[in-house]
Image (cartoon, rainbow, N blue to C red):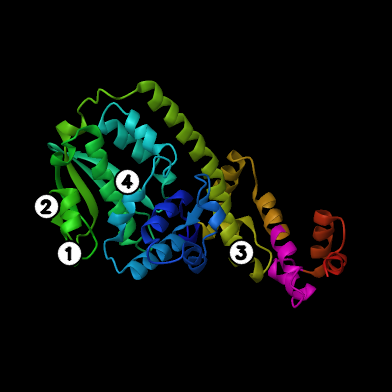
Amino acid sequence: MSESTHTTIATWVMPILSAIKPFCDEAQALQQVGIEAQCITDANQRVSVDKMRKLWELAESVSGDDCIGLEVIKYISPTSFHALYNAHHAASSLRESLTLMVKFSKVISTAVNIIVRDEGDEVVVRLDLKDGLEEPSKHARDAFMALMVKSLSDVSYDGVKHLRSVKLMRDKPKDTARHDGIFHCPIEYNSDCYEARISKAFVDQYVPTGNAELARINAEVLSDYVQRFNKSDTVAAVYNILLKLMPQGEPSREKVADALGTSSRSLHRKLKELDTSFKTILDDTRKHLALQYIKESELSMTTITYQLGFSDSNSFSRSFKRWTGISPSEYRKNIH
């Protein structure tokens, strides 16, 4: 899967904007990085990791803060990460919370895997980047690591004392005071990974404030979210490949599957499971783009035909009439 198909939950944008509010106009910041303002308060919306990286870079630039990720977490709200916050607080142990985090990590971002494993008397929590992706912002991962440490204090007021060590791939900040104040343990900068080591006894410690019923309800909410998201995520991946292939000619399912690193049969099966098909996505994509292109008077019908991957203008005209009930030329005439 190409990088542009990976996404982050849109509500992650809000705390970043709050942190940089003293330094820049929020609307201008969103416009500069290409994020639509109307989507950032909706946990069901997603933002590409490319745009999020640009936003983090902008945040550091305008604030002059090389630890801006640690400032951003001050503005996190219970709804920033959909039902994950409530699921964590309802868990009966940190182990249960971490298990939920591994299972539903794509709610926050599809670009990173969370891996939890036991090593002796420690539990290692590690952030692994999906294959082939450019490194996410150091600030995003700083923020995640800091939030994870904060979750220790949710389990017990002295929870941070059970954090043994932390590794960060980022360069050592000019001033380490904020990192030291959050992690309270040895920190290895410029490491080859992002990981935290926590006392196993603490991870498995029973939390009396846990609520099994609430935990189950929130897990169901997250499962429903992921189910809906998987469909839109797969469709978005196919859509992005179609955008690249259509100007080269009629795109086939085989070509799209190859670009996605899978087989045509597997892609067909996956789309069928999601109650859609390659033909449906191709048709919807062409219709969506055709209605945009037709408004651009400088684009000839021939250019639009080939941009959409049609072999000839007659094929394009037939499809356009099926979509709108009139020919492309009539549609353009009506617009202008």
Does the magenta segment cover residue 303?
yes
Q: Which residue is mark 3?
A: 243
> Residue shown at 20%/47% (left/top)?
196
Q: Please, what is the three-letter code of the amino acid marked with disc 3?
A: Leu
Q: Please, what is the three-letter code of the amino acid marked with disc 4?
A: Ile
When the figure is inspected, residue 143 is found, relative to residue 57, above or below; the finding is above
> Residue shown at 40%/54% (left/top)?
111
Mark toward the viewer: 1 or 2 = 1
Question: Real-space Cα distance between discs 3 and 2?
Answer: 47 Å
When the figure is inspected, residue 138 is found, relative to residue 313, above or below; the finding is above
Please give the label number shown on residue 323: none
Q: In terms of secondary structure, where does tag 4 sit?
A: strand
Instruction: Say which quadrant the C terminus sits in.
Output: bottom right
**Does 154 sit left or right of 254 as displayed?**
left
Q: Earlier in the sequence, mark 3 or mark 1?
A: 1
Question: x, y (%) of residue 316?
Answer: 79, 64
User: Which segment is the magenta one?
Assistant: 288-311
Q: Earlier in the sequence, mark 4 or mark 2?
A: 4
Question: In terms of image quadrants, where is residue 124?
Answer: top left
Please give the label number shown on residue 186: 2
